[in-house]
Image (cartoon, rainbow, N blue to C red):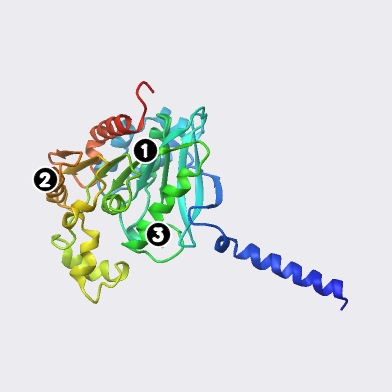
Amino acid sequence: MSLNRILTVVFLTLILALSGTQSAYAEDGAIVSREAYDFPFATYEKWLEFSDRAPDPAWHAAQMKQLVPQQDYERYASNQTVQAERIEYLSDGLRIKSILVRPAKVIKPLPIILFAHGGVAQWGKITFFEILEFHRLAEQGYIVVASTFRGEGGSEGWPNLGVGDRADLMNLIKMAQGLPEADEEKIGLWGFSRGAGLGYRVLAVTDIIDAAFFIGARTDHLNSKRRAEFDEFVYPDVVDAYAADKDAALRPLSPLFWPEKLSTKTPIYLLHGTADQRVEAWNSIAMARKLDALNRPYELLLINGGSHYLIEHQQRVRQEMDRWFAKHLKLQGS
C-alpha cells in the first residue's frame, strides 16, 4: 500500500473516531443536537381522548377543555406564535434531552424560565400538559427550557438525586444563557415536586436566579411519612452513599436543615395544597418559617383541599405564577 493510501486511511479513521466522540470535546452546556418538536397527538380530539384515560378525573377532557381551549392548542401546534424544539445539551459529558419553547418572533433579549420536573428514575418525566404550559408562557414573552435529568426520559446516564440532577440543571442554565435571543440576566426557576426540591439545592450554590416558584416541594426527606417506601424502592438506587448512612445522605437533599445556605437575593414563592397526599404541606409551611426567621424574601400560599398536582386549581396556579415572574423578571413598563 502506498504512503498516500496509508495516510488517507489513517485520516479517515481519525475523522470517524472524532465524529463518534464529538461530545467529549464540547463543554458542558453546549448544544449537541436540536430539532423541531412535534405534538404527539394528531388532533385536539385525540389529546382529549387520551386525557380521559387518566385515573384521576381532574385530568379528564372536561377539565382540559377549560384549561387549554381548542384554539389555543391548535395555535401552539401550528407554531404561529411560538416555536418549540427538542434539544440535547451536555452535562458531565452526558447528552441530556430538553425542550425549548420561545416566541416565534424575537425583537429583544427575553427572560428565561427554567422548569424542573417532578418524579425520579422511571417516574421522572415532563408531561405533555407541562409542555402546553411552556407554550402559554412563551406567548407572554419568555424563553422556557426544561430537561429530563440524567437517566430519565431518554437522557444518558443513571438517575441521580443529588449532585447529578443539580449539575444537569446548572448546565441547563448555561445552555439557556448561550441562546442569542435570551436575556442571561433575567432567569426564573419553576420547580414541581422533586424539581422544586432540586430548585432549593440550586439556590444554595448560585445567586443567578431572579425568582423561584416552587410547587409541592419536599424540604425534609428524613421525616417524610413516605420514608419507608422510598427507603425500599427509590433512595438506594438514586442517592449517593445511601447504604453507608441513610440520614447523612438525605440531609443534603433537605433544605429545611440548611436554609441559611440559600441565596439571599432570590425571592421564593412556596405553593402547596393542604390535601397533598404525596408531599405533606408542612414541608412548605416549615420552610416558610425558616425563611421568615432569616428575613428572606418569600411568599407562601396554601390552597385549601388542593392535591399534589393542583390541577384542579390550575387557574389559580397560573395566576400566581404569572404575577410572580412578571414582577421579578420583566422590566418596568415591558
Q: Nearer the viewer, mark 1 or mark 2?
A: 2
Seen from the viewer's position, the closer of residues 68 and 207 is 207
Question: In this rendering, would 6 be left or right of 131?
Answer: right
How far apart are labels 1 and 2 at the CA level?
34 Å
Q: Residue 236's spot in the image, x, y percent?
A: 27, 71
* Amino acid type at image mark 3: Glu
Q: Is residue 43 above or below residue 96?
A: above
Q: Residue 7's spot in the image, x, y percent?
A: 80, 71
* Amino acid type at image mark 1: Glu
Seen from the viewer's position, the closer of residues 200 and 197 is 200
How far apart are labels 1 and 3 at the CA level?
21 Å
Q: Which residue is the site of mark 2?
A: 293
Question: In this rendering, would 21 be left or right of 53?
Answer: right
Residue 310 falls in image quadrant: top left
Instruction: Estimate how packed mark 3 is, as few (under 14), some (14 to 19) or many (20 or more) residues with alpha carbons within 10 Å.
Output: many
The image quadrant where one finds the C terminus is: top left
Q: Which residue is the site of mark 1?
A: 133
* Amino acid type at image mark 2: Ala
User: Disc 3 on helix, strand or loop?
Assistant: loop
Label 1 with label 2: CB-CB less than 8 Å: no
User: Disc 1 on helix, strand or loop?
Assistant: helix
Q: Is residue 258 above or below residue 300?
A: below
User: Disc 2 on helix, strand or loop?
Assistant: helix
Instruction: Estimate how packed mark 1 is, as few (under 14), some (14 to 19) or many (20 or more) residues with alpha carbons within 10 Å.
Output: some
Q: Which residue is the site of mark 3?
A: 152
Q: Residue 164's spot in the image, x, y percent?
A: 37, 62
Question: In this rendering, would 321 be left or right of 175?
Answer: left
Label 1 with label 3: CB-CB less than 8 Å: no
The image quadrant where one finds the N terminus is: bottom right
